Image (cartoon, grey):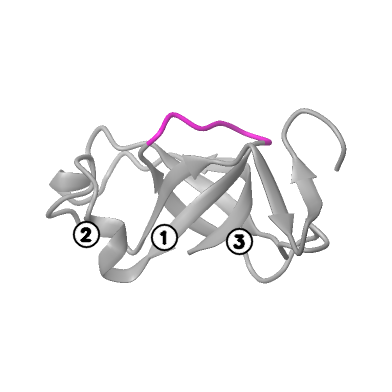
Amino acid sequence: MMIGRVVGSVVSTTKAEKLNGKKMLVVQPLDMVTIEPDGKPLVSIDTVGSGTGEVVMVVGGSSARQTAITKDTPVDSAIVGVIDHVEIDGKRTFESGGSE
């Protein structure tokens, strides 16, 4: 799993049938300590109703196909949670709606 910030969306009118009705978002991976961008953005299927600007938990590979929304769907990345806060070694590195 990794964390990332939703920075955009992808619209595709022509796609594999099993992707119809799926919300595709662009996620910028983040370093968990600094909450700074860490890597290239990726497209993830949203399974939890997240939106632009939110920090989310993302799974990849076969784990991305384990949700009710993505089961048997050709996906390699899925958003599975919206993060409230991150704490590492007793220090909060991210808190939703405030002190980042």
Q: What span is in magenta? A: 48-53
Q: Label 2: how many residues lie within 10 Å, few (<14), some (14-19) or many (20+)?
A: some
Q: Which quarter of the rendered picture does the C terminus lie within? A: top right
Asked where in the image residue 12 lies, by quadrant, the reply is top left
> Could you tell me which residue is drawn at 56 percent across and 45 percent down?
56
> Could you tell me which residue is drawn at 68 percent across and 36 percent down?
53
Label number found at residue 59: 1
Q: Separation of disc 1 and disc 3 at Cα?
A: 14 Å
Residue 69 in the image: above or below residue 87: above
**Position of residue 34 measured from the top left corner of the image (x, y, whole percent):** 83, 61
Q: Nearer the viewer, residue 13 or 65?
A: 65
Reading the image, the residue beneath label 3 is 41
With 74 as the anchor, is 89 left or right in this view? Answer: right
**Position of residue 52 measured from the top left corner of the image (x, y, whole percent):** 62, 34
Type of amino acid under label 2:
Pro
Q: Separation of disc 3 and disc 2 at Cα?
A: 19 Å
Type of amino acid under label 1:
Val
Q: Which of pointers 2 and 1 lies earlier in the amino acid sequence?
A: 1
> Could you tell me which residue is drawn at 47 percent across and 55 percent down?
58
Reading the image, the residue beneath label 2 is 74
